[in-house]
Amino acid sequence: MAGSDAALAKLLELDGEVLASYFSELTGRLAALADPSPARILDLGSGPGTGTLALARRFPAAHVTAVDISAQMLHRLSEQALAHGVADRITTVEANIDESWAEFSRGGPYDLIWAAAFMHHVADPARTFARAFERLNPGGRIAVTEMDFFPLYLPEDTGVGRPGLEARLHAATNTRPPHEWTDHLRDAGFTLRERRPFDIRLDATQAGPSLNTYAQGSLAKLRSHATEVLAEDDLAALDVLLDEEQPHSVARRDDLTVRTTRTTWIARRP
C-alpha cells in the first residue's frame, strides 16, 4: 500500500477506535428502526472496514458486503474481519461504484445500505441513490453519514504560538459547504425517516489510548493542505506540535479531546 493510502487507512481505523461510542450509538439507532433485523447489508465505500465491522457487531446474524475501489483497503478489512472473528460474515468486492454494480448486486437484494463519508465522492449522486433504491428490499433502509467538519482536538492555548491555532487551521482548510442529501433521497423514491446530527464530545478517558495517535494523524493530514493558506507563524507552530520530540507535541499531550459533529440521514424504501 502506498504511504498516503496506508496513512489514510490507519487514520480511518483509529477513527473507529476513538469514536467507538459514536458508532455504537449510530448502529443502535439503526437497530431500533429495523424490524426485522437486517439479514443482508451493503457497505458502499467501505475503506478499511470501520463501518463494516461496527455493523457486523451490531447485527450478529447479518452478512455484510463491503465495496471499495481500493484492493489495499479491502485487504486490511479482511485482516480485521479475521482478527475480530467475523470473516465468515463479510464479503469484500473491489469495484468502482460510479461504474457497474453487477458484481456486488449479486449479494442482494439488501435490507440495509450504509454509506459513511462516501457519497460526496461519487460522480453522480442522483444515479447512485437510484441504484441503491433498486437494490433494497421493500422496507429496507439506507443510512448516509457525512462528517460536518474534521474533529478538533487542541485546547485554545497550546503553549506554542498564538492561541486559536486549530480554529484558524480549520477555517483555512475546511472551505466546502456542508453536504445535504435530503432532496436526493426523496428524488430517488426514499421516505426520509430522520436527519440526525450526532454531537461528539469526548475527553481523553472516553476516547481511549489511541487519542494522541488519532489527533496526530488528523492534524498532519490538515497540515498537508495548509501550506498555501495558513500564516507562516501558524505553520511553524503547527510543525512544532506535530514534532514528536517537542515537549508540547500532540503525541505527548494529556489535554486532548475530540469535538466534532456528524450527520446521518436514515431513509426507507416504501
Image (tube, grey):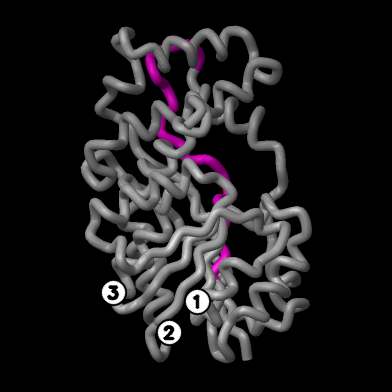
Q: CA distance from mark 3 to mark 1?
A: 14 Å
134 or 268, which lies in front?
Answer: 134
Q: CA distance from mark 2 to mark 3?
A: 14 Å
Q: Which mark is residue 112?
A: 1
Q: Residue 133: percent from the left, percent from the top? A: 66, 79
Mark 1 or 2 closer to N-term?
A: 2
Give the residue displayed 63% in from the left and 21% down from the top: 226
- Of circles 2 and 3, the one toward us is 3
Q: Which residues are magenta?
A: 143-162
**Quadrant hosting residue 160:** top left
Q: Residue 239: percent from the left, percent from the top? A: 48, 12
Mark 3 or 1 closer to N-term?
A: 3
Q: Residue 168: percent from the left, percent from the top? A: 59, 26
Mark 2 or 3 closer to N-term?
A: 2
Q: Which mark is residue 184?
A: none
- Depicted 50 relative to depicted 229: above or below: below
Element marked by disc 1: strand
The answer to whether the residues at label 1 and label 2 have Cβ atoms under 8 Å apart is yes
Number of residues whose C-alpha sits closer than 10 Å to that of mark 2, classed few (under 14), some (14–19) or many (20 or more): some
- The residue identified by callout 3 is 60
- Depicted 86 relative to depicted 130: above or below: above
Number of residues whose C-alpha sits closer than 10 Å to that of mark 1, classed few (under 14), some (14–19) or many (20 or more): many
Instruction: Tell me the amino acid under the disc marked 2.
Output: Ala
- The residue identified by callout 2 is 34
Give the residue displayed 31% in from the left and 55% down from the top: 81
21 in the magenta segment:
no
**Quadrant hosting residue 230:** top right
Q: Which quarter shows the C terminus? A: bottom right
Instruction: Tell me the amino acid under the disc marked 1.
Output: Leu
